[in-house]
Image (cartoon, rainbow, N blue to C red):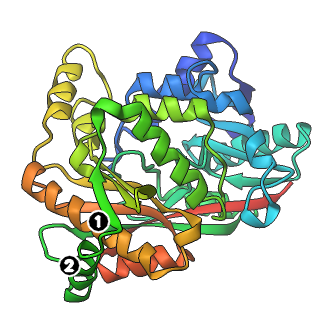
Amino acid sequence: MTDSELAITPVAGKKDFNAFIECAYRLNAGDPNWVPPLRSEVKELLTPGGNPFHEHADQQLFLARRGGRVVGRISAHIDHLALAQPAEQGMGPGTGNWGMFEAEDEGVAGALIAAAEAWLREQGMTRVLAPISLSIWEEPGLLTHGHDHPPMVMMGHNSPHYQGWIEALGYRVAKVLRTYDLDVTRQFPPLVQRIVKSGERNERITVREVELKHFDREAAIILDILNDAWSDNWGFVPITPSEVAYVGKKLKPLVHPELIRIAELDGEPVAFMMTLPDMNRVIQEIDGKLLPFGWAKLLMWLRKPRDADMRVPLMGVRKKLQSSRLASQLAFMMIEYIRRSAVAKFGSKRAEIGWILEDNQGMVAIADAIDSKINKEYLIYDKAL
């Protein structure tokens, strides 16, 4: 087959949509570290009316075919909430995105990205940040370090070839995101232990578990802190009320009260830390298929995860405290309490923290203080259109 037979077409109809989803499973079938997502989850992610991201975004999916055979895919999308953010924070006016990227070879990659760029230009975009699939809160960045082990829940994995193919098209690195690996069976260094004990003596501080019987209330508290804590961060896009409800519903099966903590100061919620058991191991075993028996295996595991690795996808401290020593003290307290619970109740041996922006000095300092080590690196690129 030659590139003259390569055709890039917008996804039109159910057959194309299903082909878009299935493309990733075929192209990654030979990668032992790729975790096949649940097909139902991918379908919902991309479907207006399913994922509330589409309430404030426009999307166009593209397929690449060579000789009639699907050889790649890409999503071009515009998040209107991102367009309203200050340009100095990474998003801003004129910034579109592409993601959900898979390509069989470099020729396919170039043609797909060109199609995404052309669509974004037609919509008036002057710049692209990519890959982001689909929101900054979902799977941002291209994996460029850490291909030798599977990703944890809610993190992406891709072919190591993609980096060279993308950079050859004039994309430059806009931001580096990193995850950190932590041996949770080990006690934290003495300095961290002293900081935790000092916080425990402070009568103004309470660190509590979330209450499942008030799940909606707790989810609203966490997302309110998150929107405030992250609002000045690079790439920030606010989470809407409908997204709060959606995320809460999606994560509820993974919620164990011991693993999600809210810190209060004088009775006011001011910080949180969310930890999730890594269900990717089970999803990999069932090959992303709930039927015929995958659902039973996944449900049993969700009810009582054992020997489960953990991931900390989100934590935050309200902005008014971020320049104070109290911010790191609250973070260390939550990390330590969750570490103890993860080991004692779930038999955990390791955890992953992040993603963390490479220039987020506060979070990098916390990761270093607890002796965690960088295990994966993701790049977000930008390019003028």
- On the image, the x and y values in percent for residue 154 come to 41, 45
Q: Secondary structure at mark 1?
A: helix
Q: Quick check: 85 above or below 43? A: below
- On the image, the x and y values in percent for residue 60 come to 73, 29
What's the distance in space between the residues labelled 1 and 2, CA to CA?
10 Å
Q: Nearer the viewer, residue 297 or 144?
A: 297
| Quarter-of-image position of residue 195 | bottom left
> Is there a contact, CB below 8 Å, between mark 1 and mark 2?
yes
Q: Inspect this view and state whether residue 7 appears.
A: no
Q: Count the marks: how many?
A: 2
- State left or right for residue 112 relative to residue 183: right
- On the image, the x and y values in percent for residue 249 come to 42, 28
| Type of amino acid at the residue the image marks with label 1 | Ile
Residue density around tag 1, few if under 14, some if 14–19, many if 20 or more, within 10 Å: many
- On the image, the x and y values in percent for residue 294 come to 22, 22
| Type of amino acid at the residue the image marks with label 2 | Phe
Name the residue located 44 percent from the left edge and 55 percent from the top edge: 269
Q: Earlier in the sequence, mark 1 or mark 2?
A: 2
Q: Nearer the viewer, residue 64 or 239?
A: 239
- State left or right for residue 341 relative to residue 229: left
The residue sitting at the bottom extreme is 191
Q: Secondary structure at mark 2?
A: loop
Name the residue located 47 percent from the left edge and 52 percent from the top edge: 159
The residue at which mark 2 appears reads as: 188
Q: Quick check: 329 above or below 6? A: below
Name the residue located 86 percent from the left edge and 54 percent from the top edge: 385
The residue at which mark 1 appears reads as: 335
Residue density around tag 2, few if under 14, some if 14–19, many if 20 or more, within 10 Å: some
Q: Quick check: 47 above or below 173? A: above
Q: Nearer the viewer, residue 353 or 38?
A: 353
